[in-house]
Image (tube, grey):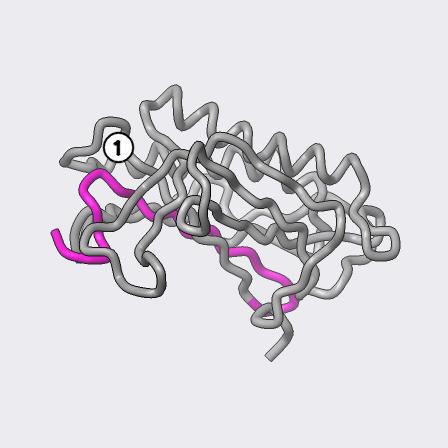
């Protein structure tokens, strides 16, 4: 095991699609108590948890021009670790039949842990918003609630399977950590003001 890997860590990559362009969210999941091995069954379980939360929660707020194209879980405890690509029902579209806002516009979910400081906070930019979800510069309450429920479903289902959704810190004060640090996510703060990601602008 060597940096940036950590024993017991799983990397989950969710790929969305819109107008021929991908948008990617990366999450980290830690096996409670740490330790190896991370099995294919573990990876399949984790990927399935994300698929279920996306399908039952966030897809309801995504425009139907968007889709969830791929969910891949990778053993991040070592280089060239095992990988599981979830295929059941993938891809699937968003469910809102209303015009989408630009792909660079997103709802930001700020994740918190029991510790303070930049190394112990995270952000997820949820894509797929429609004009029904956004008024001016603000996202409506229903969409914010759905985002909270989406994250809560993931955290709860992971805990049932003995895993934690975590903030994964590789750096401290600008320098690489000798050993990466994982901290379980305890709460989420959802800002009603929309945010943007320039990397999601069309090429």
Q: In the rendered structure, does residue 152 fall within the stretch colored magenta?
A: no
Q: Residue furthest top?
A: 160
Residue 94 x, y percent position in the rendering = 67, 47
Tell me where the magenta segment starts and ends, as one range.
1-21
* Left or right side of 29 for 108: right
Does residue 85 appear in the picture of this structure? Answer: no
Looking at the rendering, in which quadrant would you find the C terminus?
Answer: bottom right
- Label 1 sits on a secondary structure element that is helix
Q: Residue furthest bottom?
A: 203
Residue 132 x, y percent position in the rendering = 84, 48
Residue 99 x, y percent position in the rendering = 82, 57
Q: Which residue is mark 1?
A: 41
The residue shown at (42%, 44%) is: 120
* Left or right side of 157 for 10: left
The residue shown at (75%, 51%) is: 193
| Numbered circles on residues, count | 1
Question: 60 or 151, which lies in front?
Answer: 151
Question: 87 or 5, which lies in front?
Answer: 5
* Left or right side of 25 for 97: right
Quarter of the rendering containing residue 200:
bottom right
Quarter of the rendering containing residue 176:
bottom left
Q: Is residue 160 above or below residue 64?
A: above
The residue shown at (62%, 39%) is: 189
Quarter of the rendering containing residue 33:
top left
Residue 156 x, y percent position in the rendering = 47, 24
Does residue 167 appear in the picture of this structure? Answer: yes
The residue shown at (69%, 48%) is: 62
């Amino acid at each position: 095991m060597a940096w940036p890997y950590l024993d017991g860590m799983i990397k989950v990559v969710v790929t969305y699609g819109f107008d021929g362009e991908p948008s990617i969210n990366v999450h980290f999941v830690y096996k409670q108590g740490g330790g190896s091995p991370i099995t294919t069954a573990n990876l399949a379980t984790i990927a399935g948890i994300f698929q279920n939360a996306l399908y039952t929660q966030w897809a309801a707020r995504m425009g139907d021009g968007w889709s969830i194209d791929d969910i891949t879980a990778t053993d991040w405890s070592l280089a060239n670790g095992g990988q599981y690509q979830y295929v059941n029902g993938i891809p699937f579209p968003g469910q809102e039949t209303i015009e989408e806002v630009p792909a660079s516009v997103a709802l930001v979910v700020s994740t918190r842990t029991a510790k303070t400081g930049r190394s112990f906070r995270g952000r997820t930019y949820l894509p797929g918003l429609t004009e029904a979800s956004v008024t001016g510069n603000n996202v409506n309450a229903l969409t914010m609630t759905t985002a909270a429920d989406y994250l809560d479903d993931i955290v709860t289902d992971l805990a049932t399977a003995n895993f934690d959704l975590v903030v994964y810190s590789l750096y401290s004060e600008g320098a690489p950590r000798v050993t990466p640090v994982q901290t379980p996510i305890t709460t989420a703060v959802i800002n009603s003001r929309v945010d943007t990601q320039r990397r999601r602008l069309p090429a």
